[in-house]
Image (spheres, rainbow, N blue to C red):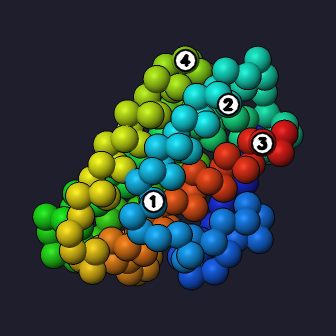
Amino acid sequence: MSITPDTKDWTWVTTQPCPDCGLDASSVPYDEIPGRLQSNAASWVTVLGRPDVAVRPQPDVWSPLEYACHVRDVFVLFDQRLVRMLTEDDPLFANWDQDETAVQEKYAEQDPAAVAAAIPPAAHQLATRFAQVTDRSRTGRRSDGALFTIESFARYLLHDPVHHLHDVRRV
């Protein structure tokens, strides 16, 4: 069974606590975000060592492996977008369909050890880049028109891997 695409607009997590995972990204000091990203990445390595990592808890819910692949790709994509925010004036980001990517990249069939090896360096690259930002007011826009400053972009990003770690710990 395929996954029902998530069509929610999650941008509200930059200003309000998430009732599901409990993260209040608006209260996290920007300077803590790089460390939190790297800590989160280390937790995914542990998740990927589970014997049931490729098993979906329900046919229409991603397995921990699929969530981990998504988190890896989020770290890479957000690093690319952050580079654009730092080097271009108000870039417009192409739409990214996470569910389509999961199917095309065969998340469910990927090697957990390879995914575990890829997440920490991807998080480190992104965390390092966030830590080096001097002008957090630079902007970028999603294809749906959502506008981010680098600071709100970092908060939006932080919620994603935290929320998904919460998802896989519930199973």
Mark in front: 4 vs 1:
1
What SS does tag 3 mark? helix
Q: Which residue is mark 1?
A: 33
- The answer to whether any part of residue 131 appears in the image is yes
Specify whether residue 143 is in view. no
Q: Which residue is label 2 attached to?
A: 47
> Depth check: 67 or 132 in front?
132
Between marks 2 and 1, how big is the CA–CA gap? 21 Å
Q: Which residue is mark 4?
A: 113
Q: Mark 2 or mark 1: which is in front?
A: 1
* Circle 3/circle 2 CB separation < 8 Å: yes
- The first of marks 4 and 1 along the sequence is 1
For marks 3 and 2 on the same chain, the one whose residue lies earlier in the sequence: 2
Q: Amino acid at mark 3?
A: Arg
Q: Where's residue 76, x and y in %?
A: 37, 44
Q: Which of the image's four quarters has the C terminus?
A: top right
The residue carrying mark 3 is 169
